[in-house]
Amino acid sequence: MQNAVRRKKKPILPVLLLAVIVAVAGGVFYFIDSRTPSKKHLSAQEYFGGSDASMAVTAGGEVTKDAAVVYDGATYISEDVIAERVDPSFYYEENEKLLVVTTPTKKTTLDLTNGSSPNKEAEILDGTVYVSVDFLKQWADAEVTQYDSPSRLVIKSAWTYPAGDVSEDAAIRESADIKAPIIKDVSSGDTVRLLDVSADGSAGEGKQEGFTKVESEDGYVGYISDKYIKNIREMTEDHTSSIGDYTTVGFDGKINMVFHQTTSQASNNALANSIANVTGVNVIAPTWFFLDDKEGGIQDLSSADYVATAHSAGMKVWAVLNDFDGNVASADDTAASLSTDTYRSKIVDTVMQSIKASGADGLNIDMEHVTKSSVNDFLELIREFSVECRNAGITLSVDDYVPTFTGYMNRAEQARVCDYIVTMCYDEHSTDSEEAGSVSSLSFVKKGIEDTLKTVPAEKTIAAIPFFTRLWTTAGGKVTSTAYGMTDAENAASSMNMSEKWDDQTGQTYCELTSGDTKYQMWLENEKSIGLKMEAVQEAGCAGVAEWKLGLEKQEIWEIISNYLA
């Protein structure tokens, strides 16, 4: 029998050991590599892009490629970039093809119906509106610097901002990742603008863990490791505005403003009787101007006699313009009336002439049919009123429902050009509500003020509270309500024998009655509920309070309000 050939056994243990070593080495390499910052650099051309005919623009903490063009020997910047990141007062109106620009005290328009303004200040190129650099410098408080290699524009329009120093040589990266390519090397001692960190060092919206978004002096925008930023502070550059300042026609002391719903001259004539028992009010706001058609027509109830009576009682008059008491009252009507320079100018001219003729001290704008689609036109109306009011020494205020309902209203822009923003802290539940509830619970008021103060300075914020409530009726699954003033609501609760108890959750007296299949509910406004609301106004440091409306209050309320404004 032939001897079998024996096979040698493979050295299994050394093979496994080698595999483990390789795996561990690979893991170690991966661990080290994953934590080793990339040294890859993007060239300036790769980062900014651009060509002989176009260039990038750094503005408002963002870099936009091809946002500027060279045309007919001049440099032009996209109007969209200017409006969004430099100065929102540059407003293009598509309907009449007008570029409308406002400063604190001036308004100008450029006609682009032929694709170019008469003196080439603006051009429409391939469907995009562009503004010349020279015109931008003339009409905006902005500094424009051009850099080469590649050609690009850096626009500065903020003169106070958070800044920090670079603690040692470091890299600004394209994104918040150590593996992201480097767009610029910075040296120890360099100062950078901080874009997602506040001057007190707290993280802002969108802050990425471990990185701070920064802008260099020459227009690079990217991310640097937090550990390389020190000496965080607010930096203010010495600067004098080339277009003037948005000065405020303010008020000496806290404001106590009551709305006066006037629907006829008879209401105006009854003012003396209406305020006979009112104390502590220093501003009265009569509803005098109503949007009357889609072309900017206005109903006008202004009265010089009314102003004289109010002044003799120690009250200033802030006349109200609204879009719901006239012959048109819908979102479509308001949008149409704001959609052209012709219509807006008609509104502004009519109202301002009457304000001046009557001797009123201020204008209050209460347009409640503004929607997200019409808000930019509304903001342009506000800017145009701002020019006229500032020039005439007239206080301008705007009413907004709380941000929960109207987050799109851009209160920061309103506050930039207006004197006061009135936050209407009521209609938490209204005629359109599908369930019964408080018109103005304490938590609703507090949140309305808190949210407003995120974008509006406290010294420009007026909190508006209600002198009314609603009697809710729920029957057959259907909810209806009727508005009552303070005394009438208490009388209704008493006459109906409704049960009453204090509700800590809403900060109001809650009333309820069930009769058969029908349920009645009310959340009363009284001395205690108003006191709690005023405490919230006081604690927030608001400029004052407003009340809707004169005639619905209890006499005792005036002293409570005054005590919190003292």
Image (cartoon, rainbow, N blue to C red):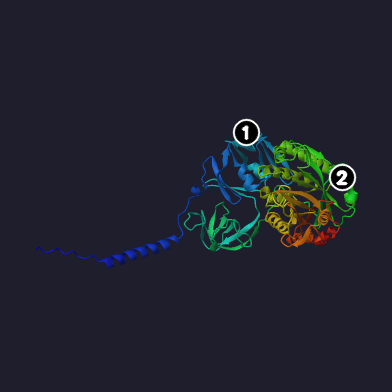
- Residue 321 percent across, percent down from the top left: 78, 44
Residue at numbered disc 1: 115
Q: Residue at x 73, y 57 (%)?
A: 441
Left or right placement of residue 284 versus residue 243 in this view: right
Badge 2: how crowded within 10 Å, few (<14), some, or many (20+)? some
Specify the amino acid type for callout 1: Gly
The three-letter amino acid code for the residue at tag 2 is: Ser
**Is residue 246 something one can see in this rendering?**
no
* Label 2: which secondary element: helix
Q: Nearer the viewer, residue 397 or 489?
A: 489
Tell me the tag on residue 267: 2
Give the position of the N terminus as an image quadrant.
Answer: bottom left
Residue 493 visible in the snapshot: yes
Residue nearest the viewer, comparing 209 with 235: 209
Q: Are marks 1 and 2 in contact (CB under 8 Å)?
A: no
Residue at 52% x, 44% y: name it.
Answer: 50
**Residue 454: horizontal and vertical position, in percent?**
67, 56
What is the secondary structure assignment of the residue under circle 1?
loop
Q: Position of residue 323 (x, y in %)?
A: 75, 42
Q: CA distance from mark 1 to mark 2?
A: 51 Å
Q: Nearer the viewer, residue 200 or 546?
A: 546
Residue 450, compared with residue 389, is above or below; it is: below
Up/down of 235 relative to 358, above or below: below
Foreground tag (1 vs 2): 2
Which of the two discs, 1 and 2, labels the residue nearer the N terminus? 1
470 and 289: which is toward the camera:
470
Dot label at residue 253: none
